[in-house]
Image (cartoon, helix red, strand yellow):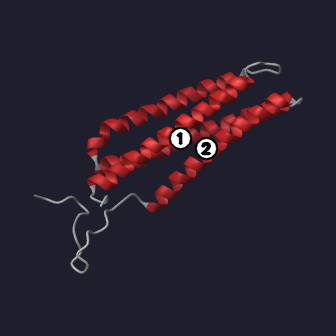
Amino acid sequence: MASKPGAETTARTGRRAAAPGPDRAWLRELDAQHQSLNGIFLALIDRVNRVRKTDDRIDAHSDLLRLIADADLLLRAHFAFEEAGGNLSEALAVAPRLAQRAAGLRRDHRRFTTRFARLATFARGMREGDENWERLGVAIGDFNRELRLHDLDENRLVQEAYLDDLGGGG
């Protein structure tokens, strides 16, 4: 019976060799992107709250729309990074059995992109005195929470691939 890659022991120590894993620099970049996305969505919520409370809604609304455009670019770049040789591709190379879950996560990327585009359209249509500012803030908060859960699901998939399939789990 063949052992899993990475399950070999070293002659000197008798311990199992460390399983190869994803590139550390790549993981740091992914973490930085997750932090940036979370930060920009928290800033969006803060900005919506400020628009609701300020007398100068026109400037505040313009500022909000610029931040939404930045968030949209960041979100799309993040998903492209993950899909183009990123964590999903790396995990599938190690653990092809996870293909169905990875495909679901990729579908989520399209769903998130479409959903955020609808939020952006809604925000662009907001006007002074509009009663939907609170609703927009709640929608952005919900979006951010669901995106964080999605990121956790991706992290679990990568961990499962490297820990279970390469024998790094113990």
Q: Compared with residue 26, is residue 53 higher up or lower down, i.e. above or below?
A: above
User: On the rendered structure, is 139 left or right of 105?
Assistant: right
Q: Position of residue 73 (x, y in %)?
A: 61, 39
Q: Position of residue 149 (x, y in %)?
A: 49, 39
Q: Circles 1 and 2: CB distance less than 8 Å?
A: yes
Q: Residues within 10 Å of mark 1 (few under 14, many from 20)?
A: some
Assign a secondary structure to mark 1. Answer: helix
In-front residue for pair 17/20: 17
| Residue at point 56%, 36% (across, down) | 145
| Residue at point 66%, 28% (across, down) | 138
User: On the rendered structure, is 133 left or right of 111?
Assistant: right
User: On the rendered structure, is 125 left or right of 78?
Assistant: right
The amino acid type of the residue labelled 2 equals: Asn
Q: Compared with residue 99, is residue 90 higher up or lower down, i.e. above or below?
A: below
Q: Compared with residue 72, is residue 22 higher up or lower down, i.e. above or below?
A: below
What residue does disc 2 label?
38
| Residue at point 69%, 30% (across, down) | 137
Figure label count: 2
Furthest residue in direction right, as rendered: 55
The amino acid type of the residue labelled 1 equals: Arg
In-front residue for pair 145/118: 145
For residue 113, which quarter of the picture? top right
For residue 107, which quarter of the picture? top left
Q: Residues within 10 Å of mark 2 (few under 14, many from 20)?
A: some
The disc placed on residue 148 is 1
Res. 83 in view: no
